[in-house]
Image (spheres, rainbow, N blue to C red):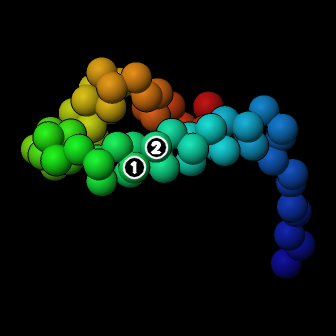
Amino acid sequence: MIRTFLQMPKKDLDKFLNKISQLNSIVNLINESKSKREELTSCKTHEEVIKVTTSWGFNIGSRWGE
């Protein structure tokens, strides 16, 4: 079995790191704000999570490789 390893393009790495940064910021936000935590935990779908976090100024809806 031959395995081929491809490097992640820099633009994808940048998107990946940006998404991690935004997710960490969301964690900090919901740890500091009970109302934000409640708003997020009331979401029932991924789409609702994206809508709520977008309203807070985050952009976590896209996959980093897209």
**Cα distance in 3D space between marks 1 and 2:** 5 Å
Q: Amino acid at mark 2?
A: Ser
| 3 up-or-down from 50: above or below | below
Instruction: Name the residue carrying label 2.
Output: 25
On residue 48, the disc is none
| 24 up-or-down from 9: above or below | below
Q: Residue at x 57, y 44 (%)?
A: 21
Q: Is residue 16 left or right of residue 27?
A: right
Instruction: Name the residue carrying label 1.
Output: 28
**Quarter in which the N terminus is drawn:** bottom right
Q: Residue at x 84, y 38 (%)?
A: 10
So how many labels did they put on this image? 2
Give the image location of residue 64, x and y in percent: 61, 38
Residue 66 placement: quadrant: top right
Q: Secondary structure at mark 1?
A: helix
Depth check: give the residue in front, 24 or 9: 24
Q: Residue at x 29, y 48 (%)?
A: 32
Residue 43 visible (yes or no): no
Depth check: give the residue in front, 40 or 34: 34
Q: Amino acid at mark 1?
A: Asn
Label 1 packing within 10 angstroms: few (<14), some (14-19), many (20+): few
Q: Are marks 1 and 2 in contact (CB under 8 Å)?
A: yes
Give the image location of residue 58, x and y in percent: 43, 28
